[in-house]
Structures are given as structure tokens and as C-alpha cells.
């Protein structure tokens, strides 16, 4: 009390002890009432209670399997559960508990529930959800629950219909071991400790194979290198469950893995038995819902004959057979009601089902015929169709008997990959297969709810089967989603999904290595009642839904012609010998090959699609600054581009990935990206730009996010072949004025052809145009993959020993400067190589040739200068295969072997020879045509002329004496002229000397735009 008062009022701390209540012998207020206290009450204060130490009795078993130390522990946690076991391997711990409902069971099935849960605390992570806690079960948790459920369910006794719940939780995980196999073994040990009747224990083990060597209990890192992921469950003598994902493993190798897995899995049994001996409960006697022999005999007498008549008639379909069997059940029910047999009426559905099972199994074993009249190894008729919906990326319909599935494929960007939040395994998944089983597929009415365990399991099985043949992510970066919609179900829809999914992937243009098909194998066995061993059995290929229900096994096997890619085994009895399982592999192979034949007849290779609906994916690399400009503040620019185009863009580590619906959308996105950040300039790359200025020697173009390039006049159009100047098919001519072709503000698609020594980018318009006639390169678009085509770039240097040196030197003078030659790898399509000379240089060569030959000289038009030069093109044979290139510098450069002086001399010799031949031809022509001079020629003068060349819109006329004229075709006039035809023409006007063919410079072309001529022909004095 004094301490309480002291805490309430600090001034009372100074009160002397002799003035306190207790020193005067009074009771304190806390003693109940005022008064004198006895001496015993003053001397003794009761001691405060001290918590005792609780001792938790822990029982542990340790054993080693595959160089891994494994522990089983019970007694420390979850002590109220009917059975609780913690299994540990390294730092991974899994708790499994079991519990059974109290009271009698009023049902005719086993309500077993298995829940597996991975919480993020097991790896020291807070969930990333809004509520920061785990939500609904994820797909992996449902799949791990199925791994536990499938082997333990067959071992519950017949007639045990009490509700049982198994819960497995991961307590800690080091990321090295997959906890699913540990959870299955811990659940088996927990059932052994409980009082629930169960025929265990079981052993579950995982087997991998690396470089041909099997690995027991592989780690996650080892599994990533393994071509086999086998999960095997068994009792001491028989197999219970198999789950396989493989990369085309052969049946022989898989059998070797199964035979290795069985003795290793048996090693889990003895530790569980020892633990149950130490800490297990006595098994409780539960009431079993058993059927009396009297009831079974009565129903058999009434229903066996009509049921056998239905099953021996192969004309019945699924629903017709079901209606006939239901009618038989109603007839038996009316008979039992007349006899007032209440006991038999309660068990009537189960009794009728038992009779059906015996009739079908007896006919299969004794006669070798099945419900629909097929032989045991016969596959139902198959129907395959690919490309069912052309607007989709890929689609197919697959039917086997009455089972039918519709599969579709959708391609997406890498950022569309599914994010996984599991404790182990990869963080994302780029290939997804979603299986859907709507109620109309079996003509029933039901609600569609969330994730269904069966749908998840079937979809994952098909996903594992197809994953083995997909191209690697580096070669095929798309995210792929396959959707399987079951249209009709009569057995093995998951294997039909494998077949339909494989065809749909091929239809989408995905380069699968080969087709994958699947088939279900069933088993009908006869058991010796005295020993419980199988004494006779039959293996059924491609089972019906009814055979799955009435048989012993559903063995789903999928694979290619080379081997198996996925397996799932579910059984109903308490184990099947491994020898029978291995025998089923050969039956499945025969059936699988038959189905593959049908699939390959429909579509054998990935389909090549056009631009209509095939998606496009492009990966570009940019600097971080460029990517920041593209994304914009808070991603505004990126979202705007996506909204305007409908494409998807993802940025990761200096890489921009764009996925578009088709090629048109992709081009639109690339144009916007180029406008913002540009692209890395590559020789052969095609870019869109805008003309910013026009010069006499070319045009400057802004492209690729603000970069400048030069479009030289020689790169505006193609030039004709030698000797085809007058050919009508040679429509293209040399451009003499840049402004006739391009103008400021005009948008062009240009190809980068190189870079000069100053770093200026050289562009070409003609390189992006088709070659005339045979030189046109036809490009056939490939499949859905946007494989970057190597650009067809015309060679810039002749590789002939006598011509290479000449062309190497003259090409340096392109664009009026000493630019470096673009060292472009020559393509298979070759074009004539050009030799360019200025007008002044041609004048000099012309004068020297005239002096040496004493021939008639020709003067240049007044006003011509170096800035108004005309080009001369010489043709030579292309030897592109002999070119030698060097990859030094930003762009590869051609090697030049001879000096510039030597090359000039050789070029001068060639020009002189050409001028001599031209002069000789001119002399001959002057003899034929009437002699006339430019001074005598006036407007209205009529002269004789000869057709010199034929152009797209008119004629080039030769009047003799070095005169050339141009005649434009009239709208309704004659056009069928030939080179050499003589005509009578009249002079209409004179030009300024530009745009006409010169006598001495026969390689100079006039522009195709003849519309500038305002009369019949124009005359140019040379």
C-alpha cells in the first residue's frame, strides 16, 4: 500500500516508518477492513506464484536418402491435431496435420480434403498484396495438394466415408528443396500417428536426370539442368502415383527411372513405422458403410441382364447409354418399392453401380471387347482442324470419338508473363495453358466458380507436355497463352488438350520442334480374393469416360515420336504392380503414333502467316537517357503511345521490347519511337525522315530522332543497264535536278548506306526502291516471328581485278568530297556499279581526247560550272562475291589496294576510249542526217530527226551535228516508236541547257518528269 501511495504522491516518501499504519498494528485498507492486525499477519506475506516449466516430449526419427539427412518429428507443435508431423530436410521444414470429423457418416463417398499452403513468412518476405496477407490458394498450392491427395486416397478402407482433412504448411524454406514431396511424406506419417484407419505408410520421392545420370532428391538448381522430373509414390510392393515432366525421354529410360525410384521411396516407410510405434494412437473403430450381400444379390438379379444388354450394344452413344441405364435403375427401384425393401432402396445407386462394374469388367477380360465395341488397343476416330478462326493468332479443333476441344493461342510481350510468388522455382512463367471444363460439355447445369482443382491439374499436365517442344526464350521471347475449351467430354479431355494445343501452336507460327500427342491408358484387372493379388488383367488404349469410372487406372501419357514429355497416373485400388505400369508405356506409344499421323496430315510445320493478324515483336537497345525520354515523366509518353497504337511496350535493362498486333501497328510504333529517341544507325537500316533543305548536289534529311543525313543526287533513282538507254523497259533515268524529286518538308523512307570519314551519314532513296524488272528483290514475309531480315544493299565497289582499283578511287568523290566508302557486305542481288566524274573533269578529258585524235571538239554550254556538274556513269560487270571488307570503325570500310594517281590514269584511258567511239558514231550519224547548226535553228524550223532514246513520256531525238531534242507524247498520239526511226519534226521552244542529253556525255539522264516541256520538242545546243 505504501508503494502504491508513493507512486500516487511522491511527498509521502518522507513519512517515517513509525507513523505508518502497519507500524501501529492496524490493518491496511487492502486487508479488507480497519482494525488491529495479528503478529502472524504482520510477519508473513504470501509468495507470488511462479510459472512452472512445461516439458514438451518430442519424438524424432532421422534417416538418410540420396545423401540428404531427413528428420521426422512429432510432439512439439500442433499437439491437439489427430496426427501432426514436422519433416525437415536441410533448412526446409514442413508441418502436416490430419483430423477426422466426429459422428456417423451419411454419404456414399470419402470426403477427403487436402490443403497445402505456402506462406511468405517461410522465406522471410511480407506479401506484396494490398492487405499484406495471403489470399486464395494459388495454382501451385492446388497442384501440391493434388500430389498429396492422389497417393493417400486409395488406401482408406472401403466404406469409410467420414470427413478427413489433411493440412500441410511450409514453416521454413531455404529455396533448395521443393517442399511438395516432403509434405506428402509428412502427411503419410501424420496419418500413421492418428487414430484414422488407413492402409499406409507410403513413400514419395523425386528423381531427376542430369547428363544421363539419375539424381535422387535433386535440388532446385539441379532440376533446372535435369531433363526429367519424376515424382513417384508407392507402398512397399506396389505403385500408387506417378507424375512426370520430361524432355522427350524414351520409354526405356523412363522405365529405368521408375525401377530406381521404387526402392528409394520404400526407404521412407520404416522411419514412419518406427515413429508410429513410439507416438502413434490406437486406430479407432469407425462405422463403415458396407453393402450387405443380400442387397447386392437382389439388385444383381433384377438388373444384371438388362445392363449387360446395354453394354453389349455398340450402337449406344454416351447419353443414350446413360438414359438406358437410368431406366433400368428406375425399374429396379419400383420393384424394391413393391417389396418394401427400405435397406436395399437406400443403397440402390451404389448397388447398381457395382453391378455395372462387374458386367463391364467381365466382358473386357473374358471377351476382349469394350463398351463401344472397340478392340482393347483401338483408338477412336480422330478429327483435326487447324486455323479454325483466322482472326486469332492460332486456333485448332481436335476431336477423338465424342471428346472435343477447341484450343486457341494468344501471343504477348515478355512483360505479359505470369508472376509467380512461390517459395521455389522461377519468378515468372512465359508459357501458360488454361484448361476450362464448362458444364455444357456433359449436358449439365452448374455454376462457374473460381479455380477448380481438376481444371488446374488437367491444364498443368497439358502445359508440361507442350513445354518440352517450345523454342528457348532467347530465340522466341513471346509470352504464350493457350486456352483449351472443352466442347464435349467423353474421356481424356486433358490428352485432347495436348493434341489441340500442339496444332494451335503450329497454326500460330511458333517453331515447335515437332508435334506432341497424348492418350489415356486404362486397366481392368481380376483379383484373387484369397491373396488380394492381381491374377489377370487387360490394358485398354484410349479409354472412355465410363471405362475410366469402372476401371482401375487412368494413365495419361503425352509425348512426341522421340519420347515422353508428361505423365500422370491415378489409380483406384490400393496399388498396381510396377511391371504392369511399364507394360502400359508400349501400348501408349502405339496409340500416340496413330494420333500423331492424323495431326501431321493436318499441319506438319509452323504456319507462315502474312501481315493480317500475326503479331510482331521487336527488341531495341537504347541508352538509359534515351529510355527516360521515351518513358516521359511518370510514364506519360509510354502510355500515350500504347493508347494511340494499341501496342505494348516494356523497358528492362537498356532494352525496349515492343509487341504489336500486326506489322502496320509495329511500323506506327517504331515511327513514334524513332521520332522521340531514334535508333542506332545501321548500314542497311531503313529510316523515315523529313527533307530539311535541298542543294544542287543533294538534300539534307532529318531522321532518327533529330539526326541529319545527306541524300546525294546520285542516290535518288536507279540507272539503266549499259545499252538499254533506249529500251522502253528501262523507265528509270538519272536525275539532274534534286528539286525535281524531293522538296523541303517531304517525308521519305531512306536506307543508310554508309558514313564518311567526317561522321556524316549517307542516305539512299534508290536503295529502298525496287530494281527495274529482273533486279527487283521480292521479299516474302516469314512466320509470326519478326526475324530481322538482312538488308539487300547494293555493292559500291567492283571487285574485278581490272576494275576494283578504278571504282574504289572514284567512289571516294561521291557527294563532292573525299568521303569514305561504306563497306557494306554485298548481297546476292547485284546492280551495275557507277563511276562518277564532274563536268569540269569530263571537259578536260574531252579536250585532250580531241587534240590527240584531231577530231571535232565540242564545247560546254555557257554558264556550266563545278557546282552544276553532271554525272557520268560507267557500267561494269559485278563481282560482289569477290569483295573484301574490313570491319574497323563505326561502319565497315572497303580496302583500296592502289594509289589514287594510278587509278586516275586508268580511268582516263577508259574515258578516252569511250569518247573515241562516240566521235566515230557521231561522224557516221552526220552522214545520214541533214546537216544543221544551232545558229540556223529557229522556232518553227522543220528538220529531219532520228529517234535516239524512248522514255516513259516521250522521245529523245537526234538532229545530227551534236543536237538533241525532246518530244513529249500526245494524249491520243502515236507511241509505238522504235530506236532509229526517222521523223519530220518542228522546233517549238529552246531550253536552258538543263535536262537534255549531251552528245559527249551520253550517260547523263534527263528526269522522268517530261511535263516540264511546253511544246513538241526542245533543242539544246552543244
Image (cartoon, grey):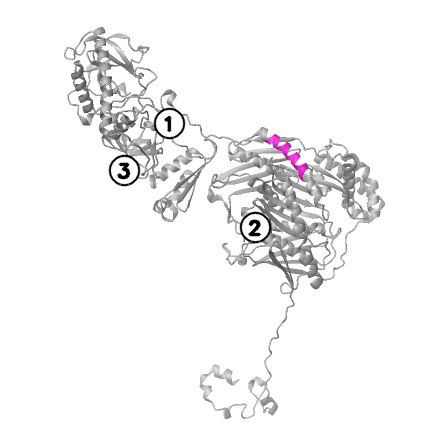
Q: Secondary structure at mark 2?
A: loop
Q: Earlier in the sequence, mark 1 or mark 3?
A: 3
Which residue lies at the image location 47% right of the left edge and 89% below the top edge?
15
Q: For the magenta stretch, what is the residue range?
A: 585-599
Which comes sooner in the sequence, label 3 or label 2?
Answer: 2
| Up/down of 50 relative to 529, above or below | below
Count of numbered tags: 3
Residue hosting label 2? 138
10 Å neighbourhood of mark 2: few (<14), some, or many (≥20)? some
Q: Which residue is mark 3?
A: 759
Q: Nearer the viewer, mark 3 or mark 2?
A: 3
Q: Residues within 10 Å of mark 1 (few under 14, many from 20)?
A: few
Q: Residue at x 83, y 48 (%)?
A: 293
> Closer to the camera, 710 or 343?
710
Asked whether 631 falls inside the magenta stretch, the response is no
- In the rendered image, residue 178, in percent from the top left (x then y), is placed at 57, 52
Q: Nearer the viewer, residue 289 or 512?
A: 512
Amino acid at each position: 500500500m505504501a508503494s502504491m501511495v508513493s507512486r500516487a504522491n511522491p511527498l509521502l516518501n518522507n513519512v517515517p516508518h513509525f507513523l505508518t499504519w502497519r507500524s501501529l498494528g492496524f490493518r491496511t485498507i487492502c486487508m479488507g477492513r480497519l482494525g488491529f492486525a495479528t503478529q502472524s499477519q504482520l510477519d508473513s506475506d504470501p509468495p507470488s506464484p511462479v510459472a512452472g516449466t512445461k516439458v514438451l516430449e518430442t519424438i524424432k526419427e532421422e534417416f538418410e536418402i540420396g545423401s540428404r539427412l531427413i528428420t521426422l518429428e512429432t510432439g512439439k507443435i500442433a499437439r491437439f491435431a489427430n496426427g501432426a508431423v514436422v519433416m525437415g530436410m536441410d533448412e526446409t521444414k514442413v508441418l502436416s496435420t490430419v483430423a477426422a470429423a466426429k459422428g456417423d457418416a451419411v454419404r456414399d463417398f470419402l470426403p477427403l480434403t487436402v490443403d497445402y499452403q505456402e506462406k511468405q513468412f517461410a522465406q522471410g518476405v511480407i506479401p506484396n498484396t494490398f492487405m499484406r496477407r495471403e489470399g486464395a490458394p494459388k495454382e501451385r498450392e492446388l497442384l501440391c495438394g493434388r500430389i498429396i491427395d492422389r497417393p493417400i486416397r486409395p488406401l482408406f478402407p472401403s466404406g469409410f466415408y467420414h470427413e478427413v482433412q489433411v493440412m500441410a504448411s511450409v514453416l521454413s524454406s531455404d529455396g533448395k528443396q521443393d517442399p511438395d514431396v516432403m509434405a506428402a511424406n509428412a502427411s503419410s506419417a501424420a496419418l500413421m500417428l492418428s487414430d484414422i484407419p488407413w492402409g499406409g505408410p507410403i513413400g514419395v520421392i523425386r528423381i531427376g536426370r542430369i547428363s544421363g545420370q539419375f539424381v535422387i532428391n535433386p535440388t532446385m538448381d539441379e532440376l533446372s539442368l535435369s531433363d526429367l522430373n519424376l515424382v513417384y509414390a508407392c507402398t512397399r510392393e506396389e505403385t500408387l502415383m506417378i507424375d512426370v515432366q520430361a524432355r522427350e525421354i524414351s520409354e526405356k529410360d523412363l522405365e529405368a527411372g521408375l525401377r530406381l525410384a521404387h526402392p528409394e521411396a520404400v526407404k521412407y516407410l520404416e522411419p514412419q513405422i518406427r515413429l508410429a510405434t513410439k507416438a502413434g494412437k490406437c486406430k479407432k473403430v469407425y462405422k463403415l458403410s458396407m453393402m450387405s450381400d443380400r442387397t447386392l444379390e437382389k439388385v444383381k438379379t433384377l438388373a444384371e441382364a438388362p445392363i449387360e444388354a446395354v453394354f453389349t450394344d455398340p450402337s449406344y452413344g454416351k447419353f443414350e447409354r446413360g438414359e438406358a441405364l437410368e431406366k433400368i435403375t428406375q425399374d429396379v427401384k419400383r420393384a424394391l418399392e413393391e417389396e418394401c425393401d427400405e435397406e436395399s432402396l437406400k443403397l440402390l445407386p451404389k448397388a447398381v453401380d457395382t453391378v455395372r462394374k462387374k458386367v463391364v469388367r467381365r466382358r473386357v477380360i473374358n471377351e476382349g471387347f469394350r463398351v463401344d465395341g472397340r478392340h482393347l488397343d483401338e483408338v477412336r476416330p480422330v478429327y483435326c482442324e487447324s486455323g479454325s478462326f483466322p482472326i486469332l493468332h492460332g486456333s485448332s479443333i481436335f476431336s477423338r470419338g465424342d471428346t472435343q476441344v477447341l484450343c486457341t493461342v494468344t501471343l504477348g510481350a515478355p512483360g505479359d508473363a505470369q508472376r509467380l510468388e512461390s517459395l521455389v522455382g522461377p519468378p515468372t512463367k512465359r508459357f501458360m495453358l488454361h484448361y476450362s471444363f464448362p458444364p455444357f460439355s456433359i449436358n449439365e447445369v452448374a455454376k462457374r466458380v473460381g479455380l477448380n482443382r481438376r481444371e488446374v491439374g488437367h491444364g498443368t499436365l497439358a502445359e508440361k507436355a507442350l513445354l518440352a517442344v517450345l523454342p528457348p526464350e532467347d530465340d522466341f521471347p513471346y509470352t504464350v497463352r493457350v486456352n483449351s475449351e472443352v466442347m464435349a467430354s467423353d474421356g481424356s479431355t486433358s490428352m485432347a488438350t495436348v493434341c489441340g494445343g500442339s496444332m494451335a501452336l503450329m497454326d500460330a507460327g511458333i517453331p515447335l520442334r515437332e508435334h506432341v500427342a497424348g492418350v489415356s491408358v486404362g486397366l481392368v484387372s481380376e483379383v484373387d480374393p484369397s491373396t488380394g493379388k492381381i491374377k489377370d488383367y487387360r490394358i485398354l488404349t484410349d479409354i472412355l469416360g465410363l471405362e475410366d469410372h469402372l476401371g482401375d487406372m487412368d494413365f495419361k501419357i503425352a509425348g512426341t515420336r522421340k519420347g515422353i514429355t508428361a505423365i500422370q497416373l491415378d489409380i483406384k485400388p490400393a496399388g498396381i504392380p510396377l511391371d504392369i505400369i511399364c507394360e502400359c508405356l508400349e501400348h501408349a506409344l502405339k496409340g500416340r503414333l496413330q494420333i500423331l499421323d492424323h495431326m501431321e496430315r493436318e499441319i506438319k510445320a509452323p504456319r507462315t502467316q502474312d501481315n493480317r493478324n500475326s503479331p510482331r515483336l521487336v527488341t531495341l537497345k537504347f541508352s538509359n537517357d534515351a529510355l527516360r525520354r521515351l518513358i516521359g515523366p511518370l510514364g506519360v509518353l509510354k502510355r500515350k503511345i500504347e493508347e494511340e497504337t494499341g501496342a505494348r511496350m516494356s523497358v528492362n535493362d537498356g532494352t525496349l521490347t515492343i509487341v504489336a498486333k500486326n506489322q502496320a501497328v509495329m511500323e506506327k510504333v517504331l515511327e513514334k519511337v524513332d521520332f522521340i529517341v531514334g535508333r542506332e544507325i545501321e548500314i542497311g537500316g531503313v529510316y523515315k525522315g523529313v527533307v530539311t533543305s535541298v542543294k544542287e548536289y543533294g538534300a539534307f534529311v532529318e531522321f532518327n530522332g533529330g539526326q541529319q543525313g545527306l541524300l546525294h543526287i546520285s542516290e535518288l533513282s536507279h540507272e539503266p543497264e549499259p545499252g538499254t538507254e533506249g529500251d522502253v523497259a528501262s523507265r528509270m533515268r538519272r536525275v539532274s535536278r534534286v528539286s525535281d524529286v524531293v522538296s523541303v518538308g517531304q517525308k521519305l523512307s531512306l536506307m543508310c548506306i554508309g558514313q564518311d570519314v567526317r561522321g556524316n551519314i549517307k542516305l539512299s532513296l534508290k536503295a529502298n526502291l525496287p530494281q527495274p524488272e529482273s533486279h527487283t528483290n521480292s521479299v516474302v514475309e516469314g512466320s509470326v516471328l519478326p526475324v530481322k531480315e538482312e538488308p539487300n544493299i547494293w555493292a559500291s565497289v567492283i571487285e574485278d581485278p581490272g576494275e576494283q582499283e578504278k571504282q574504289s578511287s572514284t567512289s571516294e568523290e561521291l557527294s563532292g568530297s573525299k568521303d569514305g566508302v561504306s563497306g557494306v557486305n554485298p548481297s546476292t542481288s547485284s546492280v551495275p556499279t557507277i563511276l562518277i566524274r564532274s563536268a569540269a573533269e569530263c571537259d578536260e578529258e574531252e579536250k585532250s581526247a580531241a587534240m590527240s585524235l584531231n577530231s571535232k571538239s565540242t564545247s560546254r554550254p555557257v554558264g556550266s560550272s563545278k557546282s552544276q556538274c553532271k554525272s557520268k556513269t560507267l557500267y561494269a560487270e559485278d563481282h560482289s562475291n569477290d569483295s573484301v571488307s574490313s570491319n574497323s570503325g563505326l561502319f565497315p570500310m572497303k580496302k583500296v589496294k592502289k594509289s589514287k594517281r594510278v587509278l586516275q590514269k586508268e580511268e582516263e584511258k577508259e574515258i578516252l576510249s569511250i569518247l573515241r567511239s562516240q566521235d566515230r558514231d557521231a561522224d557516221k550519224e552526220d552522214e545520214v542526217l541533214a546537216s544543221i547548226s544551232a545558229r540556223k535553228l529557229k522556232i518553227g524550223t522543220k528538220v529531219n530527226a532520228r529517234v535516239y532514246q524512248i522514255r516513259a513520256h516521250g522521245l529523245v531525238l537526234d538532229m545530227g551535228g551534236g543536237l538533241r531534242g525532246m518530244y513529249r507524247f500526245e494524249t491520243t498520239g502515236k507511241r509505238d516508236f522504235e530506236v532509229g526511226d526517222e521523223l519530220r519534226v518542228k522546233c517549238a521552244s529552246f531550253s536552258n541547257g538543263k535536262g537534255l542529253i549531251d552528245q559527249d556525255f551520253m550517260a547523263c539522264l534527263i528526269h522522268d518528269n517530261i511535263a516540264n516541256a511546253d511544246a513538241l520538242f526542245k533543242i539544246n545546243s552543244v
